Amino acid sequence: MSDKNSFEQRCIHTIRFLAVDMIEKAKSGHPGICMGMAPAAYVLWTQFLRHSPANPSWANRDRFVLSAGHGSALLYALLHLTGYSLPLDELKRFRQWGSMTPGHPEHGHTPGVEATTGPLGQGLGMAVGMAMAEAHLAARFNTPAHTLIDHFTYVIASDGDLMEGVGAEASALAGHLGLGKLIVLFDSNCISLAGSTSLCFTEDVGTRYKACGWHVQRPVDGKDLPSLKKAIAKAKKEKGRPSLIVVKSVIGDGSPKKQGTFEAHGSPLGPEETRAAKKNLGWPVEPDFLIEEDVRKYFRLAVRRGKNREAKWEKTFKTCAEEFPERIKELQQMLDGGLPGDWEKSLEFFHPVEKGLATRRASETVMQVLAEKIPGLIGGSADLNPSTTTWLKTFGDFQHPGTRPADTQGAVGAAWDFSGRNIHYGVREHAMGALSNGMALHGGLIPYASTFLIFSDYMRPAIRLAALMKLHVIFIYTHDSIGVGEDGPTHQPVEQILSLRAIPGLTVLRPADANETLAAWRIAVGQSGPAVLVLSRQNLPVLDTGRYPIDEGVPMGAYTLAETGRGIPDILLAASGSEVHLALGAMEILSGRGVKTRVVSMPSWEIFAARSRDYRNSVFPPEAKARLAIEAGTSLGWRQWIGDQGGVIGVDRFGASAPGPVVMEKYGFTVEKVVERALEVLKR
């Protein structure tokens, strides 16, 4: 029997042409990677990947991330063949309305898809986060006698993934950490959408990764099955470094006219070229979506193998639970995504203090309490712990064991290994967001990530993906306004809060004081999706919970904080964050002038917008025509709350370098200016 018709080759052609037929039927897609990487995918999925198609959420499964998400048809072919709940009819509905096979893989939409990928580099970053989560949970819960957490994270990455900055940042940190259970198969076909990568990507990738601390194998012939098997097996034995396997593939392999060219990247082969490719590789031209019975049976062995592996693991888990009931109870709760029943009980509201308290400092205090109660809380900042105050003081540093430098004596906590819960991301905001998403996707952890609000711009792609996947990630952004002061316009956010509010499914919380900060943390921890906490650098007065309805109000998104007089107010002042205190100060002056005033604190537009119309109208009575919004950010967006006749004190230009109080005054953020504008609005 010729090699072209060998059983393994028929299996590979089945993967290859299922993908091609999907793309042809949809008249849309990326056949090149599907054809070129079919042999590597076949080897990985049939001989190395430990998974359970009958239970895609099995906790100890290997993770597979198709970072090159444009090759989704390749993943869908593998999922169907190995027995996931993805019917062949869904492959035939590739990229169609309501199908289970969207153009790029979507986590939570298609069984077996570990991450929503497509924006290049993000998948690689999320895979690094998954490997970090595996290392962390293994360090905390494995025992000498019982290995509960022990799995690999595999990635197929493209040239584009390695070009993107987020991929480079994530790879550098993975090498520093020595994540030995991360294995990346680099589809080095030297072709991108616009042409040959020689146009722009001529670096020595393998040497770069070696310099970052990776184990590198290159080149590995993407058609040579024994070489692929040997390379993956060797990578698995490398415990102290992540592995990069440079797979020299041919994009569109088998297409007589398009293989090796950019024409095979992002468009269907076309009917004639599809027939020519099938003939060229000895594959029947008809029928489409062909799966021969012996091939199907071979791939479906994954179901039985997965069940057996899972059953063996469950037995180990049960045995360990009998010996260490409290430890395993904690792990089970973490893996289930649950919270301890008493996690909120230790949170106590702050008492007013004379000098006030920055909300970043209040957040720091809250985090220490939460970390004691919530074992899955883990995270860090982009080299900004002293500024964002987001360290967990007694829980150690997440680092590769045995690598602690001499100059780090006295660093956070005692641990310096994978059990530590403080992650040092370095100045890598792009990667920090993606890695946090990966940890959340892995399960068992509630990751947080922190930097200055202005640098949320670097993280926006990851934040967007967190919202798209409904991940429980908490983004903590400090230095929230022009009140940052002397650092000037490069560090003073203007449009960032609105930009975050524009992301569907993201809860943005900008608390007015320490007690609203505590309430905001309750929301961020208690909900299932992503949340953003926007916190101040400067001290703010602490609101007395005995006087103001903070506990009941913050969970509503917006609420009446204070008012003078009864009935419909003459004017309504709405604000968030530090500007709430300006509104309270203005209320006192306006009240002295006989103006009935209501102050509305709006920590979260999204939560408030989801409340009933009756509740919204109770806070913003339609009869109250005079309304003024106050926020040290762009005025855009506030009209939905104050109407066309209302006024806005905002920032619609960049900031300036001067002490924070001076900048705020020059930009009109004073009690006197609020009173002046309020009276102007009343005159209308």
Image (spheres, grey):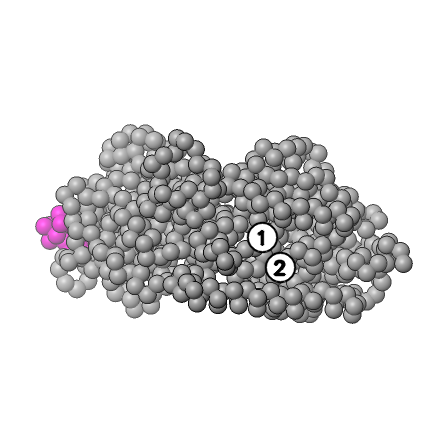
Residue 135: image x %, image y %? Answer: 50, 50
Asked if 439 appears above or below 202 in the picture, the reply is below
Q: Is residue 330 magenta?
A: no
Secondary structure state at the residue bearing disc 1: loop
- Residue 577 visible, this angle: no
Q: Which residue is mark 1?
A: 152
- Please tell me which residue lies in front, 357 or 679: 357
Q: Left or right? Give the position of 206 relative to 388.
A: right
Q: Amino acid at mark 1?
A: Phe
Q: Amino acid at mark 2?
A: Arg
Contact? badges 1 and 2 (CB < 8 Å): yes
Asked if 22 appears above or below 252 in the picture, the reply is below
Identity of the residue drawn at 68% across and 54% down: 44
Residue 643: image x %, image y %? Answer: 32, 55
Identity of the residue drawn at 74% across and 52% down: 39
- Residue 542 visible, this angle: yes
Identity of the residue drawn at 85% across and 55% down: 4
Q: Which residue is mark 2?
A: 50
| Residue 85 position by quadrant | bottom right
Residues packed near mark 1 inside 10 Å, few (<14), some (14 to 19) or many (20 plus): many
Q: Left or right? Give the position of 680 relative to 655.
A: left
Residue 632: image x %, image y %? Answer: 31, 43
N-terminal-most mark, 1 or 2: 2
Residues packed near mark 2 inside 10 Å, few (<14), some (14 to 19) or many (20 plus): many
| Residue 451 position by quadrant | top left
Report, in whole angstroms, how far the alpha carbon at label 1 lies from the one at label 2: 9 Å
**What label sits on residue 250 in the rendered view?**
none
Secondary structure state at the residue bearing disc 2: loop
Q: Left or right? Give the position of 600 relative to 178.
A: left
Q: Left or right? Give the position of 542 relative to 226.
A: left
Magenta residues? 587-600
- Please tell me which residue lies in front, 156 or 47: 47
